[in-house]
Amino acid sequence: MASTEIGHPTVVVDRVSRKFDVPVKRPSPSGRFGAHLVDSLRPEPKLTVHALRSVSFVAHAGEAIGIVGTNGSGKSTLLRIIAGLDLPSRGQVTATSQPVLLGVGAALIPDLSGIDNARLGLLAQGLAPAEVKDVMPQVLDMAGLGDAIRRPIKTYSSGMSSRLRFAIAAAFEPEILLLDEVLATGDAASVQRAEARMDEIRKRAGTVFLVSHAAQTIEETCTRALWMNQGELIADGPAVEIARAYRWWAWNVAQGKTELASELLRQAVDGSLQAELDERTPIQEELTTAGPSAEDEVIEAGTRRTMIRLSCSALGRPLTSVAAVVRFPLQLGPEVKRWRLHVRNYNDRAEASGREAQLTGVWVGRGWGGTFSAPPTSVSGPIQLSASGREHVTEWSQVPIGGGRQMMLSAGVVSHSGSVQVSTAGAWVAYGNSVDAEQMEALPKMRSNVQVPLVWWLEIELARETPVVAMWGDSITTGVGNDLPVHDAPLAQWARANNAIPVLMSAPGTGMVEWANPRDWWWSLYRRQRPDVIVHFMGQNDLTRNRTLDEMKERYLGTIDKIAAYGVPIILVSLTPAEKKGEAVAGVRRDYNEWLRSLPDPTNSGLVTHFVDLSDLTSQGGVALRPEFTRDGTHLTTKGSGQLGVLLEGPLTQALGMSEAETSRQLQ
């Protein structure tokens, strides 16, 4: 967030406490009638809940203050008291002007259109009818809903409703703006608009408070952060430091490491946590390169850049005392003459970095199965990877890759201190017992593996007219279950056969709602490129045993906005069976697919162009995958992934034609 000079105090919270007396149901009395009568005359028992405990701080003009903490920590109660919607039990709040609170529950009338709700919201904030008319274009632009602004609110997804609420509140230009989880459901474009608007308010000597469960959101949008825990303010400081501390504590809680989590809380209170963070947690930051800055380079006219993942997220344990050679299959359809390698010792699923590690070198050449058919070409010498999780980027290489050739990218990985994070990939790997770089050639025979040390991807430069197609989903879109995951993923097989570049927006083992966070590290990389078409594949991790059809619909609507933000054609794909989940889940899956098939374009933008039914991959009346296409009843084999690519053939070809026509129109 852009820096702004800190000004005069705008909000003073002075020893504020808030307690609630919650009625407790009295146990049913037993015995004689007299006992019942006496019990009924007693005062109703109550439980005292301390939502806030003597919270004090001062906010200044020009500050954006994030508030982090678990559910029940007092975040929303604090905002309500600052806004004057609730009174403290003890202490006081002083503000230089009336704070405006915007939360995810802000009232919208379901049967009214978005534009009617906007008018009512602006009038409710005190604007005169003439002022509402003047400010309405700004609200509509900020909401970014297009023609959907004239539809009833009840037809909106959660992301669309969130964007409208924010636009209504931000149009008022309050001196003090309070935001309660309103950035949690927006797509990438709407979040960027919201950030820009928050910056404008701050630059006009305003103060912004933001409550969010996503610590990275606080880190990227705020200048200062407050950490609430069980009603107490336990840490107050720079947003980056507090967000990192909270994220590391929350991860340890989720892993069941209660003793360590308790120690981290103690350190947060006494301010000694920073040294622990420097040793154990990654720094979430924008692209950092060891070579020339990508932003300082001029991309040649008629070309564009995109990323190709060599590996994807994994939940595996870190490796220790590693000496390994990793060779990735590198077989692309289009010819690529300029590229560079990105590598990082980091696990984004656990938000944890490894210790220091070294690449002994990077080579590329013809070959397959772990064996080069000719001496490979060196593209980089030794590379030192830091313990902070910061990515390293090699210099640009002019060695041609692609063109249908079977090639491999090879690197040696050693670590003297252990803790090398892993990722999912189809590659050939050989592990040794030594960490001596000079003994790398003496490692045993290579074998195919589905887990590799470190995280790897390529940044490539290619002709502007080369098709770039993305597929969004979980382990099936990653190619888990294939002979070579990632390389044999459905989209990758289709792309090789059709001279296109595949971009896997995939996260194995994760529900799409949980993963599709615009502030996720991978999403920060995806934001820098624009594919020509995106295939939307809601995964099996979204369809759990207890999830209802209505919940599946809500999950779909909660993700489609993020995909639509790219402004390219979208292809919807039906959900495939998972035999082990039982008949109840199979029924929800069947109903969800029928709903998806009949659904009009929810983005109201004309972007959703096709629905692809994957029933050709199934047997037994659609309740199971065909045996030749699966080994475990859930994931596809290489043959099954290839068949999925065949089913995408027609829709992808048509959607690419639409994208090309739109690009030509925009250039004219």
Image: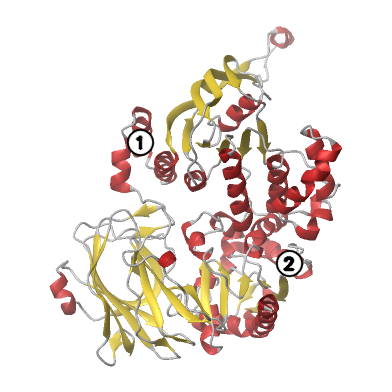
* Separation (CA) of disc 2 from disc 1: 45 Å
Precedes in sequence: disc 2 or disc 1: 1
In percent of the image, x 63 and y 35: which residue is there? 177
Q: Which mark is residue 596?
A: 2
Q: Is residue 231 visible?
A: no
Residue 89 located left or right of residue 658: left
Residue 590 located left or right of residue 9: right
Residue under pointer 1: 264
Residue type at the position of mark 1: Leu
**492 to 209, vertically: above or below:** below
Name the spot of residue 665 as percent of width and height, x first. 70, 78
Name the spot of residue 414 as percent of width and height, x first. 22, 66
- Which of 172/218 is in front? 172
Task: Indicate the secondary structure of the residue bearing disc 2.
Answer: helix
Say which quarter of the image contains residue 71: top right
Residue type at the position of mark 2: Leu
Q: Is residue 456 visible?
A: yes
Q: Residues within 10 Å of mark 2 (few under 14, many from 20)?
A: some
What is the total number of numbered labels drawn onto the structure image? 2
